[in-house]
Amino acid sequence: MATVPVLDAAGTELLTPEAAEELGARFVGLLRGLGVEPGARVVFQAPNSARLLAGVAGSLRGGYAAVVISAALTPRERDELVADVDPALVVDDARLRAAHAAAPVPLDPWFRARPMHFTSGTSGRPKAVWSGWQPATRSEAWVAEEVHAWGFGPGDRHLVCGPMSHSAPLRFPMLTLAAGGSVLVPPRFDPAVAGRLIEDGTATTSFMAPAHLQRILGAARPPARAAMRLLAHAGSACPSHVRQRARALVGDDALREFYGSTEGQFTTCTPTEFDARPGTVGRARPGRELRVDDEGHIWCRVPEHARFTYWGDPEKTAAAWDGDAFTVGDLGRLDEAGYLYLDGRRSDLIITGGVNVYPAELERVVLELPGVEQAVAFGVDDERWGQRVCLAVVGAVPEARIHAHCAEELAPYKRPKSIHVLDAFPLTHNGKVDRVRVPQVLGLV
């Protein structure tokens, strides 16, 4: 039986393509032994591990629709999502371990579908994003597009930092394996462990949210050097001081920002492009085209293999598509060279004194301040203004310093009229900041 070596006392596993192949084949063998027919949905709810990654990838090659949800969900949250997709089986870590003893079965050489993840549901009930069953040609086109975009190959050792219940922290390692590379899977994110794996050259690629970068670079002993081929980041605005420290660590050739969602990917951006156009999230990635409609909604034209539906919700699906282009409701603008700038979501828009304020802009400015870890801007009803601009932050920065910084960088109508400091933000079912609940936690709505 293939073994997965543990590299350090923290429990970091090294999953090779060969081990992933065998573990995936044994997991599919377990499903067959339990009578789970191909074509069924299988929900995975387990902490990050090599066996989780191999089980998901194997099930997709074995003809099962893998639905990945957070291990941190409450029973109510879990039951709501499980009921929505009506799976044949819910797989926890114990079930994944049991698969080690199952007889392996042959796997298809291609992914029969992409993993299913739930949207964050900040403006409604979460919905699973479903690629549909993919013929070999479409699956191969999907893998080829990702390999072209990120250069995945046999020499890669990809470090997993985020929970695989999120789309990018699963997609990057899964496609690394598909391209012949290996994956480093710590059981949980630890900035000291991640920093050491980067510094000693064990990790050559990684995807991180800006919060991961900030914690690694702000650790008691941050990495002093790195020889990484790729460090991709996305998920929220990256503070400028974090971006600059990351550039100094890995170099401009390795650092890449991108803008995307659970539904699909839109852009990539190099550090030099950001220097030339501060605030941009880049241009359309190869094979895609962007446009912004008259209301400011961002639309992305994608190849056939990148199409999706919302599971069990044809109306929501229809609203997301216009021909071969989709939108997730984000607002933005394109400059003359095709560079995209984000303004936020229509549901987040603050109208104060008859003027539109986009939370994304305020948050981006505030995140430039060292010590601010997270920021959420929102509006609350106000008799005078219609809505009052409010800001909540996590981090050790005096309110007066935030007010002063906003006064320097923003027009008066965009500045927060009140600032609230929290120890932590409430989270959605998949671990993202729950923007809707922030004002509720503060007792403002």
Image (cartoon, rainbow, N blue to C red):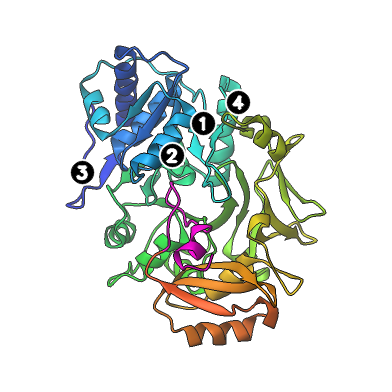
Tell me how far mark 1 sits from mark 3, CA to CA: 28 Å
**Residue at numbered disc 1:** 114
Which is nearer the eye, 184 or 128? Answer: 128
Q: Residue 405: x and y, percent? A: 56, 84
**Around disc 1, counting alpha carbons within 10 Å, would you say few (fewer than 14), some (14 to 19), or many (20 or more)?**
many
Mark found first going from the N terminus, 1 or 2: 1
**Around disc 2, counting alpha carbons within 10 Å, would you say few (fewer than 14), some (14 to 19), or many (20 or more)?**
many
Q: Which residues are magenta?
A: 425-445
Mark found first going from the N terminus, 2 or 3: 3
Q: Residue 238: x and y, percent? A: 52, 65
Q: Residue 185: x and y, percent? A: 31, 45
Mark found first going from the N terminus, 2 or 4: 4
Circle 3 sits in a helix, a strand or a loop, which is it? loop
Mark found first going from the N terminus, 1 or 4: 1
Q: Residue at x 24, y 36 (%)?
A: 4
The label number, if any, that marks residue 176 in the structure image = 2
The label number, if any, that marks residue 138 in the structure image = 4
Amino acid type at image mark 3: Val
Amino acid type at image mark 2: Thr
Mark found first going from the N terminus, 1 or 3: 3
Amino acid type at image mark 1: Arg
